[in-house]
Structures are given as C-alpha cells and as structure tokens.
C-alpha cells in the first residue's frame, strides 16, 4: 500500500470521528464494532469475498492515526 496523505480539513476530520462514534452507540451496532473472525464463525470464504473488511472500531483507529 502507498502512503496515507490526509486530504481532509480538521473540521472534516472531527465530523468523521463524531459520525463514527454516533454509529457505534445504538444497541444494533454490536455486530459492526469489531473485526469478523471467520474461523470462529465458520465462514472460511469470508476473506476471499471481502477483500478489505472494515468495522467501526478499525475506522475509529484509522481516523485517530490520520
């Protein structure tokens, strides 16, 4: 992968963080908070179908690094 160069403003970055935090709050968000474990869920084809898996926790982590 190449380098990550942020092209969004500070205001846009704060908006993204706020939006993802809001998405994590509802009780139905539980399935989207952490990465999928294809082994424990017995879905061996998951990695071949989903090339770039992304959960809300990973998105927040990536935004904090940006």
Image (cartoon, helix red, strand yellow):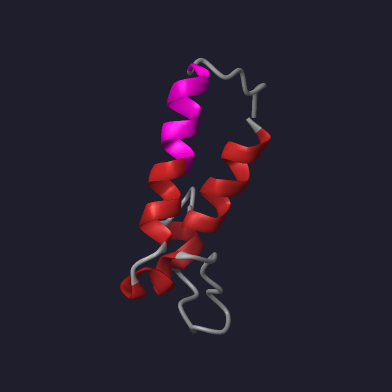
The x and y percentages for residue 64 are 63, 39
Please state which of residues 21 and 29 is positioned toward the viewer in this rendering.
21
Q: Residue at x 50, y 61 (%)?
A: 47
Q: Quarter of the image holding residue 12?
A: top left
Q: Residue at x 57, y 52 (%)?
A: 58
Q: Tell me which secondary structure the magenta stretch mostly adopts.
A: helix
Image mark count: 0
State left or right for residue 64 relative to residue 20: right
In the rendered image, the vertical position of residue 14 relative to residue 11, given as above or below:
below
The x and y percentages for residue 39 are 57, 79
The x and y percentages for residue 31 are 41, 72
Query: Magenta stretch containing residue 25, yes or no?
Result: no
Q: Give the quadrant of the N terminus.
A: top right
Q: Give the quadrant of the C terminus.
A: top right
State left or right for residue 31 relative to residue 63: left
Please state which of residues 9 and 54 is positioned toward the viewer in this rendering.
9
- Read off the magenta span: 9-17
The x and y percentages for residue 40 are 56, 84
Query: Magenta stretch containing residue 10, yes or no?
Result: yes
In the rendered image, the vertical position of residue 57 relative to residue 62, given as above or below:
below
Q: Quarter of the image holding residue 3?
A: top right
In the rendered image, the vertical position of residue 26 relative to residue 60, given as above or below:
below
């Amino acid at each position: 992968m190449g380098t990550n160069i942020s092209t969004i403003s500070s205001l846009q970055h704060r908006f993204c963080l706020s939006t993802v935090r809001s998405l994590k709050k509802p009780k139905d968000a539980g399935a989207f908070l952490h990465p999928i474990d294809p082994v424990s869920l017995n879905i061996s084809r998951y990695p071949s179908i989903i090339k770039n898996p992304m959960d809300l926790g990973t998105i927040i982590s990536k935004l904090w690094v940006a």
